[in-house]
Image (cartoon, coloured by chain):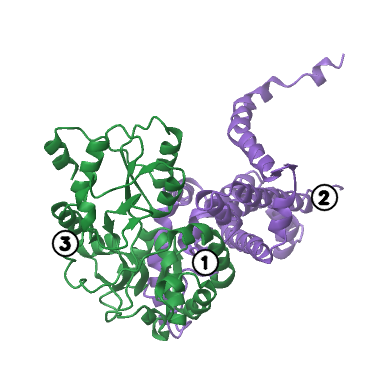
Chain colours: A purple, B green
């Protein structure tokens, strides 16, 4: 009798190719990596983790990774949310133009972008010239190879991944809700915090999770925008495999990064979960 | 070089352009049935190959021109030789500054945030440590290479001047040529002088303390299929004519003592690097660099 409810919806099978693909190219190698990080000369051990976490420098690296990912997400959120609102409200040619402006930069490689940033951000570049001309700076300051430069560059690359998820949620919201609330006497602030923001939360959350994960694991952008003197978990992983040929260290740093990202994304998903009730 | 050799001996040279560690793997896997006769690898990798008995000594009987090599370029009982010396100097932007004359110029406060260093992942980066130790202690260059405490102490003084440290040299030369950086400290002649020849406003200075050269080893494979031709190949590569041509084309120093050095470099001292020391300690140096010299 319950056969129909226990049977798998055949539509779910459409996800099978993707699941199979991810199993082979992601889950499998990732498990090998995790297992390797726990393997010692005489059986399983957590020695790699105790020695990694017992080193104060590695905590600095973890701090670097999370701080950069946090500020990159914040910048993307502050710029991306208003953009997504404008995009959802716009129509016709304007909307098409906005979408192209957001998506087209994705087709420019990260390496090209970071080289462009180098030209813009250098001490005789246009940003410095503008800030000196407007009196914000007395003399050109260093922007390249600083954390600020890294965050600005990373936010530039990842911005579309913030805007698009927010936009896809916003365009489903009935625009009349705002007017209805206004008719009922809600102030602009009330309308924003009680209606617009809660309804946009799923989009804000997925955008932020995507950008945070991308920024926490980026490798090419920090190596080009801040260089070898600033290590993150991802650059440390790359170096362990490519230079030191220390597979256990690389597996350990990769696992630490994976666990941290999952932890942060799940905890924030729980924090912004739809509040039940009336 | 290869076409000339093929013509002279009426043979075909099969060239496999792989990295040092890959070459070592090929030799290890085919021990007893080698298919390669000659191998080029970085000096630190050569040490490993010698330890595993994969190489044949290069004697003056087999390779007459090896007798004309400069001193110090024949290693571990003639198991391998250096066929070129890409030397390391200070590349600087000629529009922005006067030529540096000493490795200590890089420490001058007027170059705040204008100096680019190679990372320690890059072999030319390791040489900065040796030079820092030498500047700090005044010890002999071979002793200075072992005194890393002094090296790191000295390098800390350079921190305010360091704009960035690169792993990809292309970016470093970009910044140098744009004038955002004034110097790349630890620049390889084969790269810097090729950029200059292409019209970039840069020059490579050979500081008065002398310099080091990048690894460039060539060796005979033990049990290789063509031992006579292999020896003839090495002999030709080390011959004065080929040395003059190849060193001019690659902006490296010749290793045959009878070939004159490029103009202005006759008095440049090239200090030997203790590669065994580098291989053994590099990981520890990288770890220390992270902790003491990072942002």
Q: Is residue B30 left or right of residue B61?
A: right
Disc 3: which residue: B258
Do the residues indicated by labels 1 and 3 lie within the same chain of the protein?
Answer: no
Rendered image: mark on residue A7: none
Mark 2 element type? loop
Q: Position of residue B114 (x, y in %)?
A: 40, 76
Disc 2: which residue: A275
Mark 1 element type? loop
Q: Position of residue B94 (x, y in %)?
A: 25, 75
Mark 3 element type? loop
Q: CA distance from mark 1 to mark 2?
A: 44 Å
Tell which tag, 1 or 2, sits nearer the viewer.
1
Q: Position of residue A7 (x, y in %)?
A: 78, 18
Q: Position of residue B65 (x, y in %)?
A: 20, 52
Disc 1: which residue: A229
Q: Identify the subunit bearing mark 1.
A: A
Q: CA distance from mark 2 to mark 3?
A: 84 Å
The residue lying toward the viewer, choosing from B58 and A102, is B58
Is residue A122 at all visible to an observer of this figure? Answer: no
| Residue B281 vertical placement versus A169 (above, below) | below
């Amino acid at each position: 009798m319950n056969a129909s409810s226990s049977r798998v919806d055949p539509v779910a099978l459409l996800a099978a190719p993707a699941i199979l693909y991810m199993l082979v190219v992601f889950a499998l190698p990732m498990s090998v990596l995790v297992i390797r990080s726990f393997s010692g000369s005489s059986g399983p051990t957590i020695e790699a983790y105790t020695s990694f976490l017992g080193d104060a420098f590695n905590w600095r690296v973890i701090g670097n990774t999370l701080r950069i990912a946090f500020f990159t997400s914040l910048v993307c959120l502050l710029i991306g949310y208003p953009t997504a609102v404008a995009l959802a409200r716009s129509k016709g040619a304007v909307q098409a133009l906005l979408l192209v402006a957001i998506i087209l930069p994705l087709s420019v490689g990260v390496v090209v972008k970071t080289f462009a940033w180098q030209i813009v951000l250098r001490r005789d570049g246009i940003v410095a010239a503008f800030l000196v001309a407007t009196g914000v700076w007395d003399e050109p300051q260093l922007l390249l190879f600083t954390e600020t430069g890294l965050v600005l560059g990373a936010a530039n690359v990842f911005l579309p991944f913030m805007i698009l998820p927010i936009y896809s949620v916003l365009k489903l919201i009935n625009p009349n809700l705002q007017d209805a609330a206004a008719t009922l006497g809600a102030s602009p602030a009330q309308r924003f915090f009680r209606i617009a923001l809660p309804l946009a939360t799923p989009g804000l959350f997925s955008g932020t999770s995507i950008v945070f994960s991308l920024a926490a694991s980026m490798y090419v952008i920090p190596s080009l925008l801040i260089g070898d003197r600033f290590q993150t978990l991802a650059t440390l992983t790359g170096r362990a495999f490519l230079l030191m040929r220390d597979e256990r260290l690389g597996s350990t740093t990769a696992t630490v990064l994976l666990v941290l990202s999952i932890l942060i994304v799940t905890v924030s998903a729980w924090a912004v979960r739809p509040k039940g009730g009336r | 070089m290869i076409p000339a050799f093929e013509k002279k001996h009426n043979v075909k040279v099969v060239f496999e352009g792989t990295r040092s560690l890959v070459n070592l793997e090929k030799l290890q896997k085919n021990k007893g049935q080698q298919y390669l006769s000659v191998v080029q690898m970085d000096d630190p990798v050569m040490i490993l190959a010698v330890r595993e008995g994969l190489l044949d000594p290069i004697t003056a009987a087999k390779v007459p021109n090896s007798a004309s090599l400069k001193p110090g370029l024949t290693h571990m009982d003639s198991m391998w030789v250096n066929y070129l010396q890409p030397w390391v100097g200070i590349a600087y932007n000629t529009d922005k500054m006067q030529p540096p004359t000493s490795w200590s110029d890089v420490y001058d406060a007027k170059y705040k945030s204008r100096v680019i260093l190679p990372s320690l992942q890059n072999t030319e980066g390791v040489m900065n440590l040796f030079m820092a130790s030498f500047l700090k202690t005044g010890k002999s260059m071979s002793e200075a290479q072992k005194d890393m405490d002094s090296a790191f102490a000295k390098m800390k003084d350079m921190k305010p001047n360091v704009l960035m440290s690169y792993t990809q040299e292309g970016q470093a030369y970009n910044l140098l040529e744009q004038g955002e950086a004034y110097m790349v400290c630890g620049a390889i002649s084969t790269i810097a002088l090729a950029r200059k020849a292409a019209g970039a406003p840069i020059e490579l200075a050979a500081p008065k303390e002398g310099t080091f050269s990048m690894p460039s080893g060539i060796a005979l494979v033990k049990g290789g299929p063509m031992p006579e031709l292999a020896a003839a190949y090495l002999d030709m590569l080390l011959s004065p004519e080929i040395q003059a041509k190849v060193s001019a084309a690659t902006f490296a120093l010749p290793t045959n003592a009878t070939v004159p050095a490029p103009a202005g470099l006759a008095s440049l001292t090239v200090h030997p690097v203790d590669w065994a020391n580098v291989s053994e300690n590099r990981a520890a140096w990288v770890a220390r660099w992270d902790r003491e010299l990072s942002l």
